[in-house]
Image: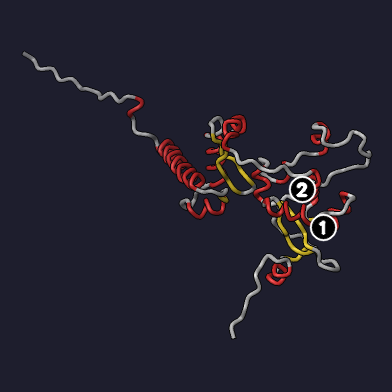
């Protein structure tokens, strides 16, 4: 009886075949991105305040592309009950806007701002950096110190610096809390003239020459005519307790 030898060619399923070098690199990049996203997600979730991209870059491994990671994570949360939102150069989790009504029962009752306070806030937002005298000139009425103090207490405005003019008046601008509260990523997301007219917030009889300034792209940077607030300035404004030197 003749013995027959058969050469058996092993079958490798397409899904079980070893990945090519290019596919291996892609897989490694995907796994890396997924792990970076998990790390970033944990950092933002654990923070009570928006987390800056600088802090994320310091905490995540070297080579992590923070903008790409956060935008990808933002898309992951786009249709969930909690959304990942950008506030200037920071990131935070917030309840989806269409579900905010669910939180109304637990919301703290807040006092509404007066019309004067809202007007003052709008002037500061659009015209910053702006002094108290400039606010009064734009509004056409005297500014109440109590109203200005109230806006400072809300955390929506801050003292930026001092204008390099006689008397060195304090300049005011908005804060990151202002952007976060009103759901803005940056100041340039403020509604423009046409949007305000469409919402009925501006009179249709406004002068044809009326225009609105474009908010600054980087509100944290001082202007050429501004000096930073020093300790002595903060002491004069009652924002810093004077140091007592021991004999």
Q: How far from the left and from the top, in percent, is residue 166?
A: 86, 68
Q: Residues within 10 Å of mark 2 (few under 14, many from 20)?
A: many
Identity of the residue drawn at 42% across and 37% down: 27
- Name the foreground residue: 168 vs 238: 238
Q: Quadrant of the N terminus?
A: top left
Q: Which mark is residue 83?
A: none
Instruction: Judge from the rendering whether residue 216 lies leftward or rightward of residue 76; answer left or right.
Output: right
Q: Are marks 2 and 1 in contact (CB under 8 Å)?
A: no
**Is residue 81 depicted above or below 224 in this figure?**
above
Identify residue for label 2: 121
> Which sits earlier in the primary sequence, circle 2 or circle 1?
2
Q: Secondary structure at mark 1?
A: helix
Mark pair 2, 1: CA separation:
12 Å
Task: Residue at the far bottom: name it.
Answer: 247
Instruction: Judge from the rendering whether residue 85 lies leftward or rightward of residue 192; answer left or right.
Output: left
- Name the foreground residue: 31 vs 213: 213
Q: How many marks?
A: 2
Identify residue for label 1: 132
**Is residue 156 depicted above or below 84 in this figure?**
below
- Name the foreground residue: 42 vs 172: 172
**Is residue 33 depicted above or below 79 in this figure?**
below
Identity of the residue drawn at 74% across and 41% down: 190
Instruction: Judge from the rendering whether residue 190 lies leftward or rightward of residue 85; answer left or right.
Output: right
Q: Quadrant of the C terminus?
A: bottom right
Q: Quadrant of residue 11?
A: top left
Task: Residue at the far top: name it.
Answer: 1
Q: How far from the left and from the top, in percent, is residue 99?
A: 59, 30
Instruction: Judge from the rendering whether residue 187 lies leftward or rightward of residue 133; answer left or right.
Output: left
Q: How far from the left and from the top, in percent, is residue 242?
A: 66, 73
Q: Secondary structure at mark 2?
A: helix
Q: How far from the left and from the top, in percent, is residue 70?
A: 55, 42
């Amino acid at each position: 009886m003749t013995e027959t030898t058969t050469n058996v060619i092993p079958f490798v399923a397409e899904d079980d075949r070893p990945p090519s070098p290019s596919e291996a690199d892609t897989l490694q990049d995907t796994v890396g991105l997924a792990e970076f996203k998990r790390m970033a997600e944990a950092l933002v979730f654990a923070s009570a305040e928006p987390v800056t991209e600088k802090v994320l870059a310091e905490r995540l491994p070297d080579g992590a592309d923070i903008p790409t990671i956060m935008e990808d994570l933002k898309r992951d949360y786009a249709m969930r009950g909690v959304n990942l939102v950008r506030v200037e150069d920071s990131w935070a989790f917030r309840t989806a806007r269409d579900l905010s009504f669910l939180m109304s029962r637990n919301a703290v009752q807040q006092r509404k701002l007066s019309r004067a306070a809202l007007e003052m806030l709008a002037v500061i937002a659009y015209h910053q950096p702006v002094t108290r005298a400039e606010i009064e000139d734009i509004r056409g009425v005297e500014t109440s110190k109590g109203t200005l103090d109230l806006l400072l207490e809300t955390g929506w405005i801050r003292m930026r610096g001092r204008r390099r003019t006689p008397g060195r008046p304090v300049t005011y601008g908005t804060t990151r809390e202002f952007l976060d509260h009103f759901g803005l990523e940056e100041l340039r997301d403020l509604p423009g003239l046409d949007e305000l007219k469409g919402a009925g917030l501006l009179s249709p009889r406004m002068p044809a020459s009326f225009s609105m300034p474009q908010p600054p792209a980087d509100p944290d940077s001082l202007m050429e005519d501004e000096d930073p607030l020093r300790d002595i300035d903060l002491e004069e404004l009652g924002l810093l307790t004077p140091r007592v030197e021991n004999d």
